[in-house]
Image (cartoon, grey):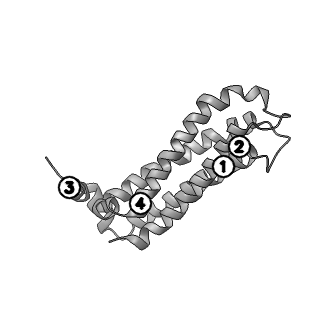
Amino acid sequence: MLSIKELMGWIESSDVAMMISQSRGWFPALEMIHVTATTFVFGMITIVDLRLLGLIARGSAVSDLYRDVIPLTWGAFVVAATTGILLFLSQAVAYSVNIAFQMKFATLALIALNMLAFRRFVYPGIAQWDRDAPVPLPAKLAGVISLAGWITVVCCARWIAYLMI
């Protein structure tokens, strides 16, 4: 049975990982796409979160905003995840032990749980508070958790390079 370090070494020695890590252009190109896609995700989610908090677009229906923004956000997330996986492959050993990288993924897991809870428990009752009624506390809480989570993800992502071994 392979240890985690051996598994990461095996991943890092794959043809795709070697191509990314040894070329002059692949890693920076993937990094640029990853950062751009993540910025898009963060920006779109921030708009939804700020609406949930009642700080912007109070006259607009949350459901309209959600319907318009979320599909685009998922598209950008797929791009960010794909490029992130490719970047990880190129330095799997170093990333796997990087505390900022680990914190980024722990926070992404929290964001995912928050999103699932919002969709399951809060969003089904949106007709009661969509436009004119005050946003209920659970929806505001989901917005705060999401916003704080994405800010943490961005901060952790920035710290990753400084904490590489």
- Upstream in sequence: badge 3 or badge 1: 3
Residue 76: x and y in percent read 55, 48
- Upstream in sequence: badge 4 or badge 2: 4
- Upstream in sequence: badge 1 or badge 4: 4
Determine whether label 4 and label 2 are within 8 Å by CB. Answer: no
Classify 136 as above or below 107: above
Residue 11: x and y in percent read 25, 54
- Element carrying mark 4: helix
Q: Nearer the viewer, mark 4 or mark 2?
A: 2
Determine whether label 2 and label 1 are within 8 Å by CB. Answer: yes
- Residue marked by disc 1: 144
- Residue marked by disc 2: 140
Q: Which dot marks residue 53?
A: none
Classify 42 as above or below 29: above
Residue lying at the far front of the rendered structure: 137
> Separation of disc 3 and disc 1 at Cα?
40 Å
Q: Residue type at mark 4: give it.
A: Phe
Q: Nearer the viewer, mark 3 or mark 1?
A: 1
- Element carrying mark 2: helix
Q: Which dot marks residue 10?
A: 3
- Element carrying mark 1: helix
Residue 80: x and y in percent read 49, 52
Q: In this view of the protein, can residue 115 be seen by the observer? A: yes
> Separation of disc 1 and disc 4 at Cα?
22 Å
Residue lying at the far left of the rendered structure: 1
- 26 to the left or right of 64: left
Q: Which dot marks residue 101?
A: 4
